[in-house]
Image (spheres, grey):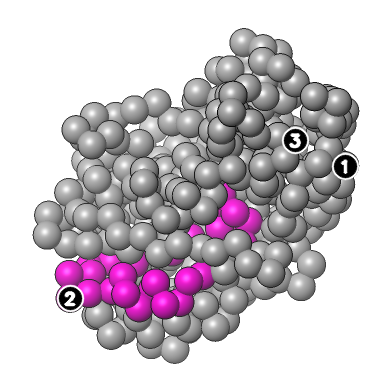
Amino acid sequence: MLNQAGNAQPTIFAEMSALAMRTDSANLGQGFPDEDGPEWIRELAVDAIRAGVNQYAPGRGTAELRHAIAAHQAKHYGITLDPDREVLVTTGATEAIAAALIALTGPGDEVVTLEPFYDSHAASIAMAGATHVTVPLLARDGRFQLDLQALESAISDRTKAILVNTPHNPTGTVLTEAELDAIAAAAQRADAIVITDEVYEHLVFDEARHQPLASRPGMAERTLTISSSGKTFSITGWKIGWLTGPAELVDAVLAVKQFLTFTSGAPFQGAIAQALIDGDTDIRELRETLARRREVLIAGLSSAGFETFRPDGTYFVCADATPFLSSELPDGAAFARWLPENIGVACVPLSAFCAEGSPAAAEFANWVRFTFVKRDDTLHTAIERLQKLRAN
């Protein structure tokens, strides 16, 4: 995150993970798996390294991976792409988002996001020199809902881009068809580009269904879709992501990317290409495991005294910490910093994903976020420790 002076600040994830390590806490703060992805995918990368695939990959990504990404979009969403012009491999979704915003927005432009927002979204907007405008999600009726009235108010003739994250980090909400249609209509009225962060696209539960905005009527020509292999296959350290969309927009992003990372991990690209083709069983098994762990965490948080919302997707459960607040612990941020030292569990305050002083920051001041993408023993340790809150 950048501060008001434009200087880079440590992320809340780095702060809370360091605190968790120092206190030997069960770390349910930062959302990274503590188990490796499928062995067969990892072995493909090992084979590539041994075979000499250790130099620069093409700037757009290997043809094998670009074709696999295009086939994935067609198979799952009916989106047809030219793998040579409309697909770009990136160093994770984070680079794709930053490169897209730097390429397509600048001073005088406004970029609209949901709020709470993933911290790199705000930082990338700041690096582009654009103005960040937010539309809050509202905690209503057991889910986080898009404030449609606020969306209408946020769009202006200065709106250059709308950055949409669904399934949504940090809340776990999956935008509904009506919410997606409202965003699509707003983008068309403003003639704005839409950039979508869909890294949790396959990690949805129950009856929820992820639908890319690019698949909505009239949106393919103005939407850049971003995703990544890290969450889908539990290999976040490989940093292989991608961006797809109209060729002229992809070319603009490539012009920036070539001066950021130039290219992305060559020995991993073939492995991810094969994972996209043959990994449906692995994705289903991960989703089933996460759905079970989600229920374990929700039950544990509820028994400790939190009010929780059941997420439709992602790795995260958001919980209202109000029952545990006091004059010494006035809000969720204070509670999150107190929890590792006193209970031995790390979480993240939801206010860290909000603009300082915004209505959303006030609405979510008492909320914290826990992740369930952890081993069963880590979850059970955290839940056992959280029960101490009832005795405090």
Label 1 sits on residue: 303
User: Quadrant location of the N terminus?
Assistant: top left
Question: Amino acid under label 3?
Answer: Lys
Name the kind of residue labelled 2 in the image.
Asp
Instruction: Evaluate if marks 1 and 3 touch, with contact meaning CB atoms under 8 Å apart.
Output: no
Q: Nearer the viewer, residue 390 or 310?
A: 390
Tag shown at residue 360: none
The one nearer the camera, 159 or 329, is 329
Report how far apart the C-alphas of labels 3 and 2 lie in the structure: 44 Å
**Location of mark 3 (residue):** 374
What residue did someone put label 2 on?
A: 157
Q: Which of the pair 84/379 is nearer the observer?
A: 379
- For the residue marked with disc 1, what is the amino acid? Ser
Q: Secondary structure at mark 3?
A: loop
Q: Residue at x 58, y 17 (%)?
A: 19
Element type at marker 1?
Answer: helix
Badge 3 crowding class, 10 Å Cα cut-off, few under 14, some 14 to 19, many 20 or more, is many
Question: In the picture, which quadrant includes the C terminus?
Answer: top right
- Quarter of the figure with residue 114: bottom left
Q: Horizontal and vertical percent for residue 269?
A: 51, 45
Is residue 59 in view?
no
Q: Which residues are magenta?
A: 146-173
